[in-house]
Amino acid sequence: MIDRFAGRIGRFALPAALALVLAGCGSSGSSGTGEPSAAQKLGNILVFQSTTPPPANQLPTDDDVYFVCPQVIVADGGAAIRAQSGPDSGSLRSQVSITTVARECTPVGKDGGFTLKVGTEGRVLIGPAGSPGSYGATLIVQVMRNNQVVARRSARVGGSIPHGQTGVDFSHVESNISVPAGSGDVEIIVGLSPGGGEPARRRRR
């Protein structure tokens, strides 16, 4: 579920390739039918504002240089929020979880600063002890440099599950996140929280 961070400045792929490699949780490559995966669709939306990329003859040439965007990391303990009345699985009332993440970086000037767009898809489920209704959690997006928070966004995500259904999908995009220039590696961390608190910062390596 956790993508490793690899943020540096250098040459990058064309936007079509960028859309295909945007970080995804639990989904990679195309589906068995040849259709884009959920991660690819979310990446295409971030880059091209469509689930599919434009024709190849409308893409920039190999001479274009792109900033290598840091990958998205899902914080330990932040991939899912569960509500249950007891320790066993039968006591689960609801679960809100992240299924796919993606990002797009746009360099600002030549000093290393950039603006960031982060997309998240997830799913809300009701468990054996749950019932139809509205369920949600707080999605927190943090940008870290040298263990310091340089940008932070939070938003309420979730959905309403009607009678006769056990789950519903949600999607959310945070745009225009400003990341100032500076030295040191940058990490983009997303996580779910029951309220508005910080997601867990410790990540598995």
Image (cartoon, rainbow, N blue to C red):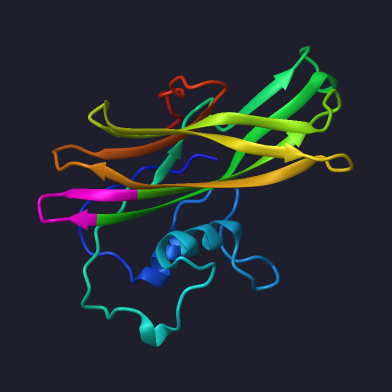
Q: Percent position (x, y) of residue 159?
A: 67, 39
Q: Percent position (x, y) of residue 193?
A: 53, 24
Location of residue 106 by image quarter: bottom left
- Looking at the image, is 189 positioned above or below residue 106? above
- Which corner quadrant holds the C terminus? top left
Report if residue 165 lies within the magenta region.
no
Q: Is residue 171 left or right of residue 152?
A: right
Location of residue 89 by image quarter: top right
Residue drawn at x 59%, y 67% as measured from the top left:
36
- Which corner quadrant holds the N terminus? top right
Which is the main secondary structure of the residues drawn in magenta?
Answer: strand
Report if residue 113 lies within the magenta region.
yes
Tell me which segment is drawn in magenta.
Answer: 107-116
Location of residue 107 by image quarter: bottom left
Q: Percent position (x, y) of residue 167?
A: 76, 41
Residue drawn at x 21%, y 68% as measured from the top left:
65
Q: Percent position (x, y) of residue 22?
A: 44, 56
Name, please, the residue furthest toward the left.
111
Name, please, the residue furthest toward the bottom.
57
- Looking at the image, is 173 positioned above or below residue 15? above
Residue drawn at x 46%, y 65% as measured from the top left:
49
